[in-house]
Amino acid sequence: MTCSADRPAHASDTVTAGTVVPAREDIGDAEGPHVSAGKLQKFSALVLISLPLAGLGWAVAWSWDDGVSRLALAIAVGMYLLTGHGLAIGFHRMFTHRSFRPTRALKIALAIAGSMAVEGSLYTWTAQHRRHHAYADRPGDPHSPWCYGNGFVPQLRGLWHAHLGWFFRANPSEPERWIPDLLADPDLQLISRTAAIWALLSLALPTLLGWALTGTLTGALATLLWAGAARIFLLHHVTWAVNSVGHMFGNRPFATRDYSTNFAPLAVLSFGDSWHNAHHAYPRLARHGIDRHQIDSSAAIIRLLERVHLATDVVWPTAANTSRRRYPRTGHQEDSSRLQ
Ligand SMILES: [Zn+2]
Ligand SMILES: [Zn+2]
């Protein structure tokens, strides 16, 4: 397992605004991130990580002289918006954190759109993410960048671990323990079990669109490479950067028991999920960018879904429910934006 067993509050922890802030030197653990995964998991991780990278390399080499067609780019943007919001609104805010209640049609649509992001099945993704919140930056967290401890080299190793390395480590997030509510839903059982089909659809859809709109195999290949592989590559690394960068660089306007940060440069590409410190402070909120001018397209879409009655019981931020953990604006604000 990673970052191994449960960790009780430590004497050197500090309490700020009613929450425990763990002592940094106490986060690394001897066994945690060192337990290797089984062969099948390692092989799957290698395929998941290397195929989009190979596709991106092929796309760049192939388009080097003539550039990328506007059609391939437009379909890539459309697929990125569809699958990224499926992930941020569906997998993350709705399935993992229950930020709102969807109609059955919306639930199924979000589960399929999120599965087309090709980040593993719905059940695996949500179980890992609930585990992450339960143990964030403590022993038991599947992908804390603080797992190797403090200092420049341990933190660099930690960044690698939180971004990619954790896929090659044993991460037992038992679905029965972490997502019993999702396991009980027959629609989600079917969609989660057929994750490979949605992954193939994620490549087939842009390819068929490119073929239909250009009538050529070259057009189909261009959209497969750019709107398939390259788009999957970009979304993968944006999501994983929230796990790695989003627990080390940026600022922390809210007191949490972890090192989550708000990292503004990724707000657009992550559809609002990079306001990660606010999210860890208040995980159930449908809006993560809860301060003025914080871009959060997922929240804007949830608002639209609420207006047309496809989403109900939305948990919106209010001054009352977001002030308790906020650091005083003129006082202490922890800045994690540098390696130490
Ligand atoms: Zn979350
Ligand atoms: Zn986090």
Image (cartoon, rainbow, N blue to C red):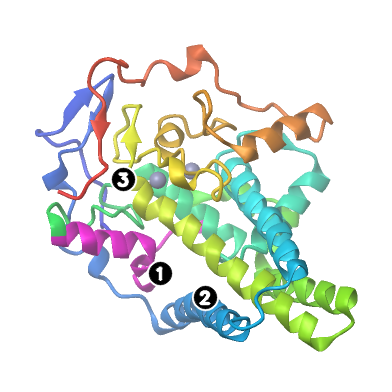
What x and y, as percent, mark residue 299?
63, 34
User: In the displayed image of the protein, which residue is found farthest to the front?
Assistant: 65
- For label 2, being within 8 Å of ligand 2 is answered no
- Residue indicated by mark 3: 249
Q: Quadrant of residue 303?
A: top right
Mark 2 and mark 1 residues within 8 Å of each other at the beta carbon: yes
Find disc 1 in the rendering and name its residue. Answer: 167
Task: Mark yes or no: residue 116 visible.
Answer: yes
Q: Secondary structure at mark 2?
A: helix
> Which circle's residue, 1 or 3, is located before the other in the chain?
1
Left or right of 310, for residue 254: left
The number of callouts visible is 3
The region drawn magenta spans: 153-175
Q: Residue at x 22, y 21 (%)?
A: 332
Tell me what residue is drawn at x 74 percent, y 56 percent.
186
Kind of residue indicated by mark 1: Phe
As measured in the structure, the alpha-carbon distance from the residue carrying label 1 to the one carrying label 3 is: 22 Å
Left-right relation of 79 to 144: right
